[in-house]
Image (tube, rainbow, N blue to C red):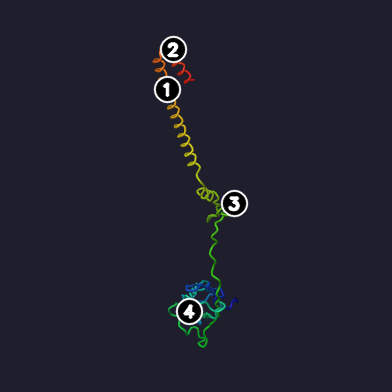
């Protein structure tokens, strides 16, 4: 903009990310780079559709003012997404003692000898922002985990790896189950050995008694019993 203009406007086009049945806002910034107090007023061709806050005000020398324009929720989309609404920004040099509540329509009338400037702003509808992709980083097969960066620029790769490790199966629990199973098998094996020894001892005793009743001398029976016990031990 040229230096003769009272206010610099940014942006020069009001863009609304259009969505049905949703109230949408955009903002513009008015900058006064002069040494004068500049009053402004915002008008629109469709006042029922838009709400401007503030719609009037005074911008101090070498300062800025933000203006928010809100479009009411729309039930239908316009043909070809084209908007014919327009805004008019009026600005005028005022005395330093003028406040926002003191602004009158006559201040923006050139017939009263006031220094007044006007600028027309167009309205455009733009596509709404797209939602982020649902695919997680590093979830694809064969892809490596990506490190995140904190607000101070520090790479948080270690913390990301810790988060990923929480999703892996824990081996400690598996090892404990295997050890418990081995101990149980050993106990069952030892129990089987003791039962076999007890049964063998019982059979030897019965055989000894049979030999005694058959008329074999007690010394021979004892030798038979002793030999069976030694064989059991070995």
Q: Eyeballing the image, is 144 above or below 185?
A: below
Seen at 54% across and 66% down, the residue is 130
Q: Position of residue 220 (x, y in %)?
A: 44, 12
The mark lying in front, picked from 4 and 1, is: 1
Residues marked 4 and 3 touching at CB (< 8 Å): no
Residues marked 4 and 2 touching at CB (< 8 Å): no
- Of labels 3 and 2, earlier in sequence is 3
Judging by the rendered image, the residue that carries numbered circle 1 is: 203
Seen at 41% across and 15% down, the residue is 214
Q: Tell me where residue 1 sits by quadrant.
A: bottom right
Q: Is residue 200 left or right of residue 137?
A: left
- Of 20 and 189, nearer the camera is 189
CA separation, marks 4 and 1? 107 Å
How many residues crowd around disc 1 within 10 Å: few (fewer than 14), some, or many (20 or more)? few
- Of labels 4 and 1, earlier in sequence is 4
State the SS at label 3.
Answer: loop
Judging by the rendered image, the residue that carries numbered circle 4 is: 49
């Amino acid at each position: 903009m040229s230096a003769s203009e009272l206010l610099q406007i940014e942006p020069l086009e009001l863009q609304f990310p259009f969505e049905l049945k949703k109230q949408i806002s955009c903002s513009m910034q008015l900058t006064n780079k002069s040494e004068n107090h500049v009053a402004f007023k915002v008008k629109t061709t469709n006042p029922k559709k838009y709400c401007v806050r503030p719609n009037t005000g005074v911008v101090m020398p070498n300062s800025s003012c933000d203006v928010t324009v809100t479009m009411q929720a729309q039930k239908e989309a316009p043909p070809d997404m084209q908007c014919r609404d327009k805004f008019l920004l009026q600005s005028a040099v005022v005395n330093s003692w003028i406040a926002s509540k003191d602004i009158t329509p006559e201040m923006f009338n050139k017939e009263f000898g006031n220094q007044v400037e006007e600028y027309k702003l167009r309205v455009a509808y733009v596509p709404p922002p797209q939602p982020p992709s649902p695919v997680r980083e590093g979830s694809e097969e064969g892809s490596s985990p990506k490190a995140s960066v904190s607000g101070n620029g520090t790479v948080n790769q270690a913390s990301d790896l810790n988060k990923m490790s929480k999703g892996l199966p824990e081996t400690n629990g598996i090892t404990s189950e295997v050890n418990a199973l081995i101990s149980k098998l050993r106990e069952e094996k030892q129990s089987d050995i003791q039962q076999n020894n007890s049964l063998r001892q019982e059979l030897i005793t019965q055989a000894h008694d049979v030999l005694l009743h058959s008329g074999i001398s007690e010394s021979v029976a004892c030798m038979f019993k002793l030999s069976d016990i030694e064989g059991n031990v070995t």
